[in-house]
Amino acid sequence: MLYLDMISGISGDIFLSLMGQLYGNFEKLGAELSIFLDTEMTLNLEEKLVNGIRAYKLNLKISKEPHIHRTFKDIRKMLESSHFDENIKSDAIEIFRIIAEAEAKIHGKDIDEVHFHEVGAIDSIIDIVGAAWFYNKLNRPIIKSSYFRLGNGFVNSQHGVIPVPAPATLEIVRDCNFERLDIDEELTTPTGAAIVKFYSKGFTRKVCGKVKNIFYATGSKSFERYPNLIRLLKLEDVEDEGIIEIETNIDDMDAEKFGFLMEKFFEVGALDVFYTPIYMKKNRPAYKLSVLCKEELFDSIVNIIFKFSSSSGIRFSKIDRIVMQREIKNFNYKGVDVRLKVYRYNDIEKVKVEWEDLKKLSQSLNIPPLKLEIDILKKYEANN
């Protein structure tokens, strides 16, 4: 798990710096973005000391500013026709959509009509596509975040003087926890807010685990009373942790709505959702809905139940659990990278092949999945 500690806000380039420190290979990303934008560019990290703490600032060099139309519709088409993997395309488009919807609401226009500059700027395109690229190269890790940090004061924009936080930023962080610092600066940008809102599975000050690595990033600004620092913690989840189980009985809802309800729970980060057939009063067939979630998601889960189901009441309890540590490994099988899920607890280890990769390879080689999985695991064990 990754924990994003937004000490003094967040911007797209700072998020990119942190993910790049974790994954590396800025040269490859620069080459991919050069193809996408049809211009030569390089990305590198510059070491800086911030209040005595070593941090890294992202530097971008670009040979020529490419001509890019400034609408969400244009950028979406540009991404859809690009060479990137589907997950990277999809993530980037949805992050752009978050900003576009905020701008459209503020300016009172349709999302495809907004001619906005935050998303159209080349730096923001690089930050968003780069964030999606790194996140998927890291096998889509779980990210949790501290509260958004917002500044105060006023800044100049193309529309004139506007308050801080900028209207687009405030619209994006709607429904997210935030706190304001006594700094007359823009601390969180629309691009940074949109990236974190899309990828974060929860905003909390409560995080537990073993710290395996720490990464620091900074930007160009410096503040008198606060360090301009953001840090990323790579955590090994603790083996025992408390969660909440939420339940409700439903006997008056159409069956097709249950699938939609389950999707909503997983969208906000539920750990598990399941239905149990039961009989209620008057011998009515019904379902018991059970949702397992972390404590910080309790309000979100309850809101979904009351908004999208026929239930008018819930029951809940805090329960303990023990989970095996999980690691995603890439394993080369006959020239194809296959993701393996490696589970560990004390001296116990279990390995499973990621089903989507197994299914795809099974179809490609015309070998039954069960037989193929046995062979993959046999070769993996021989190499480990």
Image: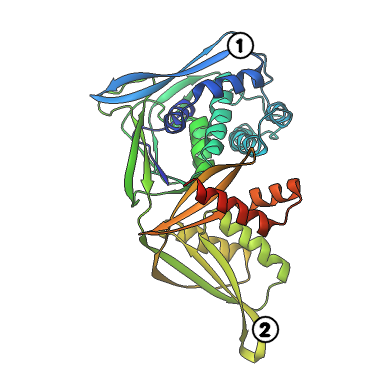
- For label 1, the crowd category at 10 Å Cα-Cα, with few meaning under 14, some 14 to 19 and many 20 or more, is few
Q: Residue at x 46, y 57 (%)?
A: 297
Question: Who is closer to the viewer here, 303 or 295?
Answer: 295
**In the image as oriented, which residue stretches furthest toward the top?**
63
Percent position of residue 12, x then y = 49, 28
Q: Are marks 1 and 2 in contact (CB under 8 Å)?
A: no
Mark yes or no: residue 280 visible. yes
Decide if residue 151 is on the left or right side of residue 61.
left
In the picture of the structure, the residue carrying the numbered disc 1 is 65
Question: Who is closer to the viewer here, 131 or 228?
Answer: 131
Determine which quarter of the picture holds residue 44: top left
**In the image as oriented, which residue stretches furthest toward the front?**
382
Image: 246 above or below 103 = below
Percent position of residue 27, x then y = 52, 20
Percent position of residue 198, x then y = 54, 42
Q: Residue at x 48, y 30 (%)?
A: 166
Q: Amino acid at mark 2?
A: Pro
Determine which quarter of the picture holds residue 232: top left
Q: Residue at x 52, y 33 (%)?
A: 134
Q: Amino acid at mark 1?
A: Glu
Which disc is residue 131 wearing?
Answer: none
Question: Who is closer to the viewer here, 3 or 235?
Answer: 235
Q: Tag 2 or tag 1, which sits nearer the N-term? A: 1
Q: Residue at x 67, y 38 (%)?
A: 86
In the picture of the structure, the residue carrying the numbered disc 2 is 285
Question: Who is closer to the viewer here, 94 or 274?
Answer: 274
SS label for mark 1? loop
Percent position of residue 38, x then y = 67, 15
- For label 2, the crowd category at 10 Å Cα-Cα, with few meaning under 14, some 14 to 19 and many 20 or more, is few
